Image (cartoon, rainbow, N blue to C red):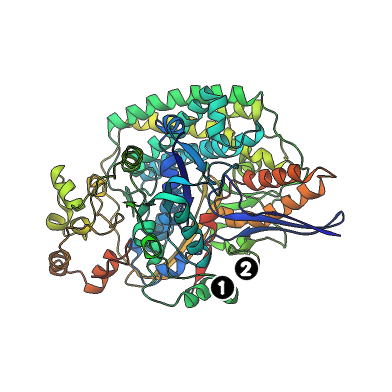
């Protein structure tokens, strides 16, 4: 007898998605993650527009990843136009990425995922039960936003990032404010980690997780030119299509990715798996207290990997701000350049995983082709594999429990569905 | 009983829901003042049938599924607020320049795109009555909080008719359009952002949609004199609000 389990609307994720499971007795017939987000066709809309319009438009692919999209687009356009940015610009962009990481991870780990671990339907009800903890979580989230506001000009859809540099550099007063907030952030992080240490992480699925992440080319954890898979394969960013290898599937508006015919996971857990040796200091201690043991076979631990990265990002941001205050900023207007025909690819690690932007421009700087591949899109195929494993490992639990488990697996990826449906190629 | 609030997202980037969640200092007070009865983005327990005192809706309508969802929200809500530029004007994903959606979908998804439910992106007011608008991409946090306070106390949020340019002048910022010949959309874009972008030496890109009191003719004339092509000017002014065809 076949049995269907349908989760029509996944709650506490960014965007619209559902889960469909079809069982025939104990045999799993189908496990699908459905995406029915309205399609927005960004890459097709960019064609024929000037490269100057691109960052402001692609930012709108996704609010929570807007700093990542904007800066990655700038890096790809800079590559196409042959522009080299200064070390100062690179480090300020690095700071922006730390802000995005703090804000996004605090939102997902504490407001969207954690309620499941403690049996609450939302952070709103959690606020009633644990007001102190929620206030601390919100302070951390705000810290990420403060960084994004100061460096990027606005928390959602930044305005200050331009080709070759910045519209305006942060002032000393702003840096001092950040320095102070970051010190408080380190204390808040310790408080919340102490609370987390007493929370049991649900462990109901036992399945290997194949990971992919950029290899940091220097001390910047979120930037790199080569992607590495946990089975050792390496792919230069310019050849990203060999990895992301997208195909459409009938049940979803989002494309799926696979490499060598098998799915892979991107995101915090993947970064710790591939580059964990670079985590030191307080973040290393947080990892020892609450982080995932490696290799990790419990996808739900991605949320705890985000907490480790949260600690990393606060510490890294503090180091960057300290160094800016020590040396001061060089007054440098955005790099001068000439418009020319060319193609450029850039990849960065944004909170949910590797993000790729690729543009081809004609000699007038008009977009001939655009390609954006988001982490969530890369994760869909892997999420379906892990959902399948969760059904397999469930034994004969009741349906309500199984439904909650499926939701938790999907939420573990911190899916950003609004992002994923713009994954497309215009030629 | 606390006023019942619903928060909904149609086609968009989730920006307005993120702005709401970004009210970190006010969030706990807000939770105390209202009942978030239907908020799928924040809670896994929702009442999808209950009458709502206020429905906040972000995103544009891009297909039959969403039109149906929007009409259902309208039927349940005493007041409906369009949040953000997509809900108010269509937003960036409406910039298809009249090209057939099927062609665009095929360019992106190949043959698979032909079966997708996709239509041009429309503002909410094309389908239902909208009681208040909070434009902005994203909407401003302070304007959202002000709107909540107004609506809970039986008033409507103030409507700003002036352009960004007015706010820029008040802040005595250097004019990018006149003194630097940069294509700044400040003169024709609705105010409320505090002329943020020019404050960062970056031109306004019109993310709040058209100002009620704007002189498009004069703006176009200045830009033409500065050497911009008419086609590029039109494109620029329609990036966020294709409805504002001038």
Q: Callout 2: 10 Å neighbours few (<14), some, many (20+)?
A: some
- What x and y, as percent, mark residue B82? 37, 53
Q: Which mark is residue A66?
A: none
Marks 1 & 2, CB-CB < 8 Å contact: yes
Identify the residue position indicated by label 1 in the image: B113
Query: Between A299 and B84, which is closer to the camera in this rendering?
Result: B84
User: In the displayed structure, does residue A289 sit left or right of residue A110?
Assistant: right
Q: Please identify, in this view, whether the residue under mark 1 or under mark 2 is nearer the observer.
A: 1
Identify whether B212 is placed above or below A268: below
Q: Is residue A208 left or right of residue A50?
A: right
Asked if one can make out residue B239 in the rendered structure from this viewpoint, the answer is yes
Q: Chain of mark 1?
A: B
Which residue is drawn at the image coordinates 55% and 46% (left, top)? B40
Q: CA distance from mark 1 to mark 2?
A: 9 Å
Q: Total of numbered circles in the picture?
A: 2
Mark 2 lies on residue:
A248
Residue A273 drawn at (x, y percent): 66, 41
């Amino acid at each position: 007898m076949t049995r269907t389990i349908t989760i029509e609307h996944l709650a506490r994720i960014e965007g619209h998605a559902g889960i469909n499971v079809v069982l025939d007795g104990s045999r799993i017939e189908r496990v699908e993650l459905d995406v029915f987000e309205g399609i927005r066709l960004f890459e097709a809309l960019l064609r024929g527009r000037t490269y100057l319009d691109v960052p402001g438009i692609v930012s709108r692919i996704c609010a929570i990843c807007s700093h990542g999209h904007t800066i990655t687009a700038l890096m790809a356009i800079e590559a196409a136009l042959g522009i080299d940015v200064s070390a100062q610009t690179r480090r300020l962009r690095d700071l922006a990425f730390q802000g995005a990481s703090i804000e996004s991870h605090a939102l997902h780990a504490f407001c969207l995922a954690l309620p499941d671990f403690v049996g609450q339907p939302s952070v709103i009800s959690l606020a009633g039960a644990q007001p102190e903890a929620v206030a601390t979580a919100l302070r951390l989230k705000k810290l990420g936003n403060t960084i994004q506001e100061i460096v990027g000009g606005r928390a959602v859809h930044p305005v200050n990032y331009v080709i070759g540099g910045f519209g305006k550099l942060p002032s000393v007063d702003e840096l001092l404010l950040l320095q102070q907030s970051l010190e408080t952030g380190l204390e808040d992080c310790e408080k919340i980690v102490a609370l987390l240490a007493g929370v049991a992480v649900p462990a109901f699925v036992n399945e290997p997780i194949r990971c992919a992440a950029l290899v940091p080319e220097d001390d910047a954890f979120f930037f790199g030119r080569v992607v590495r898979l946990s089975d050792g394969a390496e792919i230069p960013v310019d050849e990203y299509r060999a990895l992301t290898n997208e195909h459409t599937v009938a049940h979803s508006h989002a494309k799926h990715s696979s490499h060598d015919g098998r799915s892979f996971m991107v995101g915090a857990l993947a970064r710790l798996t591939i580059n964990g040796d670079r985590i030191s200091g307080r973040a290393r201690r947080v990892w020892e207290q609450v982080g995932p043991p490696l290799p990790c076979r419990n996808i739900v631990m991605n949320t705890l990997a985000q907490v480790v990265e949260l600690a990393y990002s606060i510490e890294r941001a503090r180091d960057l701000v300290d160094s800016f205050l020590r040396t001061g900023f060089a007054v440098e207007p955005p790099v001068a350049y000439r418009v020319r025909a060319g193609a450029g690819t850039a990849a960065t690690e944004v909170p949910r995983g590797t993000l790729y932007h690729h543009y081809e421009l004609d000699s007038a700087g008009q977009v001939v082709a655009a390609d954006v591949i988001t982490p969530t899109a890369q994760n869909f195929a892997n999420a379906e594999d892990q959902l399948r494993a969760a059904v397999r490992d469930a034994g004969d639990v009741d349906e309500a429990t199984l439904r909650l488990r499926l939701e938790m697996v999907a939420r573990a990826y911190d899916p950003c569905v609004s992002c994923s449906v713009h994954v497309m190629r215009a030629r | 009983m606390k006023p019942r609030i619903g928060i909904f997202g149609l086609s968009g980037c989730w920006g307005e829901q993120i702005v709401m969640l970004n009210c970190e200092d006010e969030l706990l007070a807000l939770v105390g003042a209202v009942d978030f009865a239907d908020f799928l983005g924040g809670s896994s327990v929702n009442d999808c049938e209950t009458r709502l005192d206020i429905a906040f809706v972000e995103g544009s309508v891009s297909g039959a599924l969403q039109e149906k969802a929007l009409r259902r929200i309208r039927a349940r809500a005493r007041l409906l607020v369009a949040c953000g530029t997509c809900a108010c004007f269509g937003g960036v994903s409406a910039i298809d320049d009249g090209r057939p959606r099927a062609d665009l979908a095929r360019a992106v998804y190949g043959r698979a795109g032909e079966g997708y439910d996709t239509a041009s992106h429309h503002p909410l007011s094309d389908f239902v009555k909208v009681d208040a608008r909070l434009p902005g991409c994203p909407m401003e946090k302070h304007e959202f909080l002000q709107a909540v306070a107004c609506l809970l106390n039986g008033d409507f949020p103030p409507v700003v008719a002036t352009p960004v340019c007015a706010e820029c002048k008040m802040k005595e910022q250097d004019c990018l359009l006149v003194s630097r010949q940069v294509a700044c959309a400040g003169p024709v874009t609705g105010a409320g952002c505090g002329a943020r972008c020019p404050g960062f030496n970056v031109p306004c890109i019109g993310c709040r949609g058209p100002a009620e009191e704007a002189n498009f003719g004069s703006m176009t004339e200045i830009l033409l004199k500065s050497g911009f092509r008419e086609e590029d000017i039109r494109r620029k002014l329609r990036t966020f609000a294709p409805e504002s065809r001038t």
